[in-house]
Image (cartoon, grey):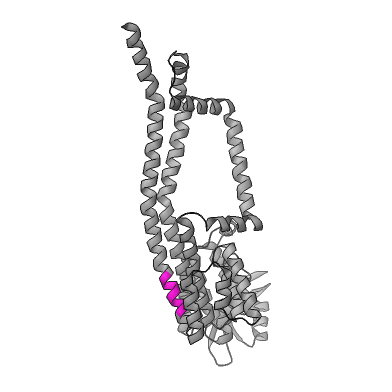
Amino acid sequence: MATYSYRARDDKGALVTGTLEAETKAAVYSQLDAMGLFPVSAKEARTGLSAGDDILARFQRVGYDDLVFFTRQLQTIVRAGIPLISGLRALEEQTSNGRLKMAIRDICQEIDRGQSFSNALSKHKRIFSELYVSMIRAGEMAGALEEVLERLAGVLEFQMKTKEMLKSAMRYPVFVITTLVIAFIILIRVVVPRFVPLFKGSKVALPLPTQILLLINDVVQSYGPLVFGGLIAIIVLVVLYIRSDKGSYVFDTLKLKIPLLGQIILKICMGRFAFMLENLVRTGIPIVKTLDIVSRTVGNKYIAEKILEIGMKIEKGKGISGPLKDAGIFPPLVIHLISTGEETGSLEEMLREISVHYDREVTYSVNRLSAWVEPILTAGLSVMVLFLALAIFMPWWNLMGALRSGGG
């Protein structure tokens, strides 16, 4: 079975291009005839990826920037009135990401077989999220694919900006902490052992910082592999627990209680909740289904469970503002604005206001966190340097004092 690219004309004489899988060129012509198309030409298509590249592409990551580019370009294609299959073929050639290129090729083949665009996308869940597929499906049903693609691009850009903001805020703390750990390991393994014989051989009483440092050195030298293995085992067990359903729920609950950081996480989740809900409500997806999708995109399982509970209460005939208040997690501002929007018929506008508000709040809070983190880390670094300096130099001062006393 090989892939053939073809050129054909429909019953109106318009040129149609695409690809089909068939054993021979004659089989391609037979398929085109069955599709009601008049064959013009067919040739075996090159995939653009060698066998080795094809394997590597399956493990390549598709980032937000790749999806934003794909979505924006597809929106332009739909707006220009270009047939979807032809536009996807063009995007396949333009896409540099190997894994996304393979996915687009498979999507084209599924559409050629009669599948809808949304169903073809749903076969690539690791690339296109449930939110993405659901919005595309709603756009197909409402005949508003161009508008939905524009909103999808906005959603992806919002998620990318939020992620980059958090990464930027955490970059400096991670760098400093990593540097401290490496420096401490080098001191314990290389520097301190050179002083141990001298300190232990002296008859001078060692100060507390030096005793602590020597104790740490003894533990590392005697039980280093055991301690290291134990730490690795604990980390692995914690990671496995967090990845479980129960563990991730507990971890997400605890994250909201962390001073400073917990409030930032809550604001990010509220911004995502309002932004996603507004965009999905505009596409015409039923509110219960909308909340189910939104719960999968807020990024916190505890809040997601609360959103699902709200959906169940709405399904029983209750409004949205009452269940929001009962959930006990949504700030008063969110409850008030949604209640106002529900009463005045301007829910979408109120959700947009919430989204914009929390977008500003997250930016402000992250900047404030960065302002707090830097002096805290600087103070921690200073304390560590002071401890090491006292642990190493205080015995020398005591020893020199003892020598002077003995000499006097």
Q: Is residue 195 visible?
A: yes
In-front residue for pair 326/114: 326
* Residue 299 painted magenta: no
Q: Residue furthest top?
A: 407
Residue 308 position within the rendered picture, expressed as x and y whole percent measured from the top left: 62, 71
Q: Quadrant of the C terminus?
A: top left
Residue 31 position within the rendered picture, expressed as x and y whole percent measured from the top left: 67, 81
- Is residue 167 shown left or right of residue 128? left
- The residue stretch that appears in magenta: 350-357
Q: Is residue 133 visible?
A: no
Q: Residue furthest bottom?
A: 12
Q: Quadrant of the N terminus?
A: bottom right
- Is residue 91 shown left or right of residue 237? left
Q: Residue furthest left?
A: 408
In-front residue for pair 330/127: 330
In-front residue for pair 189/96: 189
Please name the predominant secondary structure of the magenta segment in the image: helix
In-front residue for pair 28/309: 309
Q: Residue 6 appears in which quarter of the rendering?
A: bottom right
Residue 60 position within the rendered picture, expressed as x and y whole percent measured from the top left: 54, 58
